[in-house]
Image (cartoon, grey):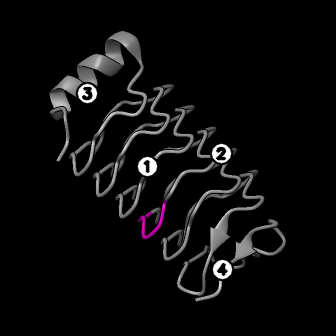
Amino acid sequence: MADFTREEIEDLIAKVRKLKKANLEGLDLSNAKLSDADLRGANLTGANLKNADLIGANLRGSILIRANLHKANLSKTHLEWANLRKANLCLANLRGALMYEAILQESNMDMTDLTKTNLRGAMYNNHTKFPEGFDPAGAEMVLMEE
């Protein structure tokens, strides 16, 4: 269970922009304005971040298992070493995001904008859904066997 309410999160972000290692598990943060927030190592398991503005946010090493990031704006976001297993990234904007060595097994990235996204070393499996025509091997991603 989350340690904060949605209102407390938005207030903290507006004031200090830092929630490093915060427990935000299961929170409804849909449409939240979290651009440039420091969320390194935060637990966002099962959080609803649909349509959230996360432009330039720092989510390095964050746990986003089963998070809903449908239509979220994650452009220029730091997602290095983040765990996005089973996350919904459908229609998300990941343009210019840094996602090397992120865990993307079973995540849904259908119709996601991956323009200039660094996915080197990111892990996926046969259940990961990519945008049509996307080549994970060409992006230097690592296929994990079942």
Q: Position of residue 69 (x, y in %)?
A: 40, 55
Upstream in sequence: badge 3 or badge 2: 3
Judged by depth in the image, the label closer to the viewer, 2 or 4, is 4
Looking at the picture, does residue 26 appear above or below residue 52?
below
Looking at the picture, does residue 119 appear above or below residue 125?
above
State which region is magenta.
84-88
Q: Is residue 76 magenta?
A: no
Q: Amino acid at mark 2?
A: Ala
Q: Main secondary structure of the magenta part?
A: loop
Upstream in sequence: badge 1 or badge 2: 1
Location of the C terminus (image quadrant): bottom right
List the residue tagged with mark 3.
Answer: 9
Judged by depth in the image, the label closer to the viewer, 1 or 2, is 2
Q: Amino acid at mark 3?
A: Ile
List the residue tagged with mark 2.
Answer: 97
Between the residue at mark 1 and the residue at mark 3, the CA separation in whole angstroms equals 17 Å
Q: Amino acid at mark 1?
A: Ala
Q: Position of residue 35 (x, y in %)?
A: 46, 29
Q: Nearer the viewer, residue 43 or 131?
A: 43
Residues at circles 3 and 2 in contact by the CB criterion of under 8 Å: no
Left or right, residue 101 beside residue 15: right
Judged by depth in the image, the label closer to the viewer, 4 or 1, is 4
